[in-house]
C-alpha cells in the first residue's frame, strides 16, 4: 500500500492533445528525412582534415534524433507532482505496456549518452587545436568507439534491469491513487502508467558527469580560443579557421541544450506542485520534438561544406526534374510532328563524331 500525496492539477484538454498529435505526426516524418540527409552529408562531404570528429557529430545528432523520436512514439505525458508519466501513442495502440517502459528508457539513455559524446567532442577539439595528437589518436581509435558503444549498452541494460518491475509498480500506483479528484483518477487509471526509477549509473551521469562536463567544456573552449590566437600556433590559416568554426558550432549546440532543454525543465520541476505543471510539461515535451530539427538544420547550414552539399543536392534534383520535363515535352513534339525532310521510314541518329547516319 503506497502513501501517495494528492496534488490537484489541471489536465491537457482534448483539443490540445489533438493539435499536438497532428503536429507530432507531421513533424516526425520530416525529421526522419532530414536525419537521412544529415547522415549522408556528414559521411560523404566531411573534409579529410576533420578526421574521426565527423563520427562524433553523427553520433550526437543520432542521439538527439532517437531520443525525441522515442518520446513521440509513446506520446509521453509527464505528471511532475507524482514523478510518473502517462503513455499513450504506440504502446496504447498496440496494447503493449512494456513498450512504453522500453521507449522511455531508450529516450533517457540516448540523452545521457549525448552528455558523454559532447564531452568527447570538446576533448577532441581541445586536443586537435592544441596539437596533442596522442589524445586525438585515442579518441579516433576504433576500440575507443567500441568502448563508448559498450557504455551506451550498459546504460540501456542497467535501466531495463532497474525497471524490470516497472509495470507492477505502475499497477500498484494506479490502485492506490487517491480519489480526491475522480477525473484525475480516471485519467491515471485508464491509461498506461510509466513508473521508472533512476539507477546509480544514471545519477552519476546526471548529477556528477554532466555539471563537471559543462565546466570542462568551457575550459576546453577557452583553451582552443587562446591557442589559436597565440603567436606560437603553427596551424595554417585555413586549418585555424576550420577549428574555429568547429568549436563555435559545438558551443552553440551546448548552449542550445541549456536554454532549450535544461532551463525549461528546471522551471517545470521547481513548479511541480502547481496546478498547471502537467499542462506545462505536456507542451514542453512537444516543443522538444523540434530540438533535433534545430540541431540537424544547424549542422547542415553552419558548416560551409555541408551547406554547399545540400544546395548542390537540391539544385541537382531541380535540374534533373527540369531536364526530364524538357525531354518529355520535346519527345512528344517529335512524335506528333515528324519532320517532312526525311523519308517516312528513316530515323536519324547523331554519332559521337558529330555526323548523322540513317538507320
Image (spheres, helix red, strand yellow):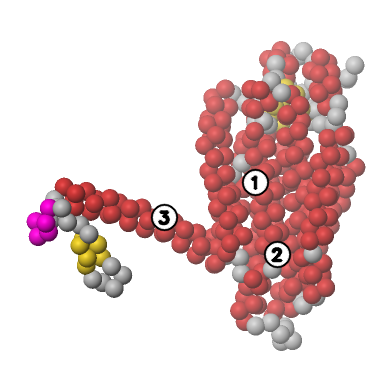
Q: Distance between the residues labelled 2 and 1?
A: 19 Å
Q: Quadrant of residue 56?
A: bottom right
**In the image, which residues are magenta?**
340-344
Residue 215 visible from this viewpoint:
no
Residue plotted at (76% across, 56% down):
117
User: Looking at the image, is mark 2 or mark 3 nearer the viewer?
Assistant: 3
As helix, strand or loop, the secondary structure at mark 3 comes to helix
Crowdedness near tag 3: few (<14), some (14–19) or many (≥20) residues, C-alpha within 10 Å: few
In the rendered view, tell whether residue 325 sits above or below residue 51. above
How far separated are the C-alphas under marks 3 and 1? 26 Å
Q: Looking at the image, which is closer to me, 223 or 92?
A: 92
The tag earlier along the polypeptide, 3 or 1, is 1
Which residue lies under the disc numbered 2?
53
Among numbered discs 2 and 1, the one appearing first in the sequence = 2
Closer to the N terminus: mark 2 or mark 3? Answer: 2
Q: In this view, does 323 lie above or below 241?
A: above
Q: Position of residue 254 (x, y in %)?
A: 70, 57
**Which quadrant holds the C terminus?**
bottom left
Judged left or right of residue 264, residue 296 is: left
Q: Quadrant of the N terminus?
A: top right
Residue under the image location 79 percent in, 31 percent down = 83
Give x and y (percent) for residue 219: 79, 67
Q: Mark 1 points at which residue?
A: 65
Task: Determine which residue is flagged by label 3.
Answer: 317
Q: Say above or below: 346 vs 353.
A: above
Amino acid at each position: 500500500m503506497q502513501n501517495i500525496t494528492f496534488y490537484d492539477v489541471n489536465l491537457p484538454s482534448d483539443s490540445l492533445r489533438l493539435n499536438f498529435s497532428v503536429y507530432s505526426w507531421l513533424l516526425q516524418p520530416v525529421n526522419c528525412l532530414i536525419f537521412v540527409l544529415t547522415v549522408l552529408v556528414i559521411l560523404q562531404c566531411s573534409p579529410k582534415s576533420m578526421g574521426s570528429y565527423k563520427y562524433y557529430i553523427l553520433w550526437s545528432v543520432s542521439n538527439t534524433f532517437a531520443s525525441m523520436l522515442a518520446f513521440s512514439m509513446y506520446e509521453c505525458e509527464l505528471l511532475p507532482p507524482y514523478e510518473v508519466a502517462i503513455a499513450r501513442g504506440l504502446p496504447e495502440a498496440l496494447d503493449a505496456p512494456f513498450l512504453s517502459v522500453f521507449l522511455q528508457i531508450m529516450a533517457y539513455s540516448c540523452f545521457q549518452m549525448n552528455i558523454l559524446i559532447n564531452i568527447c567532442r570538446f576533448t577532441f577539439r581541445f586536443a586537435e587545436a592544441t596539437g596533442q595528437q596522442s589524445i586525438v589518436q585515442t579518441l579516433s581509435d576504433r576500440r575507443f568507439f567500441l568502448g563508448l558503444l559498450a557504455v551506451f549498452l550498459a546504460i540501456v541494460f542497467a535501466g531495463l534491469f532497474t525497471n524490470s518491475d516497472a509495470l507492477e509498480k505502475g499497477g500498484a500506483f494506479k490502485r492506490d491513487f487517491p480519489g480526491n479528484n475522480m477525473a484525475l483518477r480516471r485519467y491515471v487509471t485508464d491509461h498506461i502508467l510509466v513508473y521508472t526509477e533512476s539507477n546509480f549509473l544514471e545519477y552519476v551521469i546526471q548529477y556528477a558527469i554532466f555539471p563537471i562536463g559543462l565546466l570542462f567544456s568551457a575550459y576546453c573552449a577557452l583553451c582552443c580560443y587562446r591557442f589559436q590566437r597565440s603567436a606560437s600556433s603553427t596551424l595554417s590559416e585555413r586549418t585555424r579557421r576550420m577549428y574555429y568554426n568547429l568549436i563555435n558550432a559545438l558551443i552553440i549546440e551546448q548552449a542550445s541544450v541549456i536554454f532549450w532543454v535544461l532551463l525549461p525543465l528546471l522551471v517545470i520541476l521547481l513548479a511541480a506542485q502547481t496546478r498547471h505543471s502537467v499542462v506545462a510539461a505536456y507542451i514542453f515535451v512537444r516543443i522538444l520534438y523540434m530540438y533535433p530539427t534545430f540541431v540537424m538544420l544547424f549542422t547542415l547550414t553552419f558548416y560551409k561544406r555541408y551547406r554547399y552539399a545540400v544546395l548542390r543536392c537540391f539544385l541537382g534534383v531541380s535540374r534533373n526534374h527540369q531536364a526530364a520535363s524538357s525531354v518529355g515535352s520535346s519527345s512528344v513534339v517529335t512524335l506528333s510532328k515528324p519532320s517532312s525532310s526525311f523519308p517516312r521510314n528513316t530515323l536519324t541518329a547523331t554519332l559521337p563524331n558529330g555526323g548523322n547516319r540513317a538507320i
